[in-house]
Amino acid sequence: MITILGAGAFGTALAISLARTGPVRLWAHDADHVAQMGATRENSRRLPGVVFPDDITVSAEISAPGPEDPVLLAVPMQRLRGLLLAQGDALGNGRLVACCKGMERATGLGPTGVIRHCLPGATPAILTGPSFAVDIARGLPTALTLACDDPAAGAALQQTLTTPNLRLYRTVDTIGAELGGALKNVMAIGCGAVMGAGLGESARAALMTRGFAEMSRMADALGADPDTLAGLSGFGDLVLTCTSDQSRNYRFGLSLGRSEAFDTSITVEGAATARAVRDRAAALGVDMPITGAITGLVDGQLQVRQAMDMLLSRPLREE
């Protein structure tokens, strides 16, 4: 049995895909939401119009998984610690696969780092890469990275979580995989802001390229494998989220560039992550001017034109 904690769009989409090959338990903290999904057999709040397969069971209760049964943690990054601490008795020795992207604001840790800190007896992993929930739910082909520093556990998880439309590539580099997923959200905000302000496709391409250089510098400073950043969890996810308005981070950036209000009920992981990355980069002595400028936009300290002028006025250098 696969358990998925979090009935947002992505958790629901994973449940739908995985239930095509076996039983899945989908958990939500809201009992009314659980009742609604059970009665209608769809998640009309987050993923309307996609009917649940018969093998999905919805529940508001969390029970201890079997020793080899994976638990997917599909909750926002900034809520991950609270869930782990609240459910530690049930999850403490499990195979826990984070499906969130970001860096914890208070600690600068990524998802697997938070799992290790909260539940030392668990086996942490992360599932990340270029993907939109609606594509996964509709059975469209999607390739993701599964990172787990325990090779045997990673191989078992890869087999269990692969479906006809989900192809998983395995790595032991959890640091690189989670950094790619976290930092691309920051760059997606910046790209949205560039397009929202009407600065053009060329400016967006430049920001993506130089943003990827910043991502690589941070990964190198933290000991990640540079090949990981060049793969699905880094470059692949960067391309997707910096070019599509299906990305919440990109849409948030568009609103900043247009000086428009943004729906505060929508989770924008890149906003909190930008602040965490800026602080951690400063502590490590890593030069990340684009991240700093995007943080200024998010915090309302800079306008898009000011941020671009600041970046363009930096000293000329070799690429």
Image (cartoon, rainbow, N blue to C red):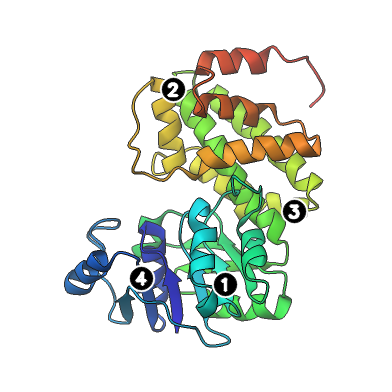
- How far apart are the two marked residues, 1 and 4, measured between alpha carbons? 19 Å
Q: Nearer the viewer, residue 187 or 122?
A: 122
For badge 3, the amino acid type reads: Asp
- How far apart are the two marked residues, 2 and 1, measured between alpha carbons? 38 Å
Q: Quadrant of the C terminus?
A: top right
Q: Are marks 4 and 2 in contact (CB under 8 Å)?
A: no
Determine which of the numbered discs, if any, sits on residue 157 in the image.
none
Side of 192 where 32 appears, left or right = left
Give the residue drawn at x 44%, y 19%: 197
First reached walking from the N terminus: tag 2 or tag 1: 1
Q: Are marks 3 and 1 in contact (CB under 8 Å)?
A: no
First reached walking from the N terminus: tag 1 or tag 4: 4
Secondary structure type for disc 2: helix
Q: Position of residue 219 (x, y in %)?
A: 74, 47
Q: Position of residue 135 (x, y in %)?
A: 38, 57
Q: Find disc 1 in the rendering and name its residue.
A: 96
Q: Find disc 4 in the rendering and name its residue.
A: 16
Q: Position of residue 85 (x, y in %)?
A: 54, 66
- How far apart are the two marked residues, 3 and 2, measured between alpha carbons? 33 Å
Q: Find disc 2 in the rendering and name its residue.
A: 257
For badge 4, the amino acid type reads: Ile
For badge 1, the amino acid type reads: Leu
For badge 2, the amino acid type reads: Gly
Secondary structure type for disc 3: helix
Q: Find disc 3 in the rendering and name its residue.
A: 227
Give the residue drawn at x 42%, y 42%: 248
Closest to the camera, between mark 1 and mark 4, is 1
First reached walking from the N terminus: tag 4 or tag 2: 4
Closest to the camera, between mark 3 and mark 1, is 1
Image quarter for residue 245? top left
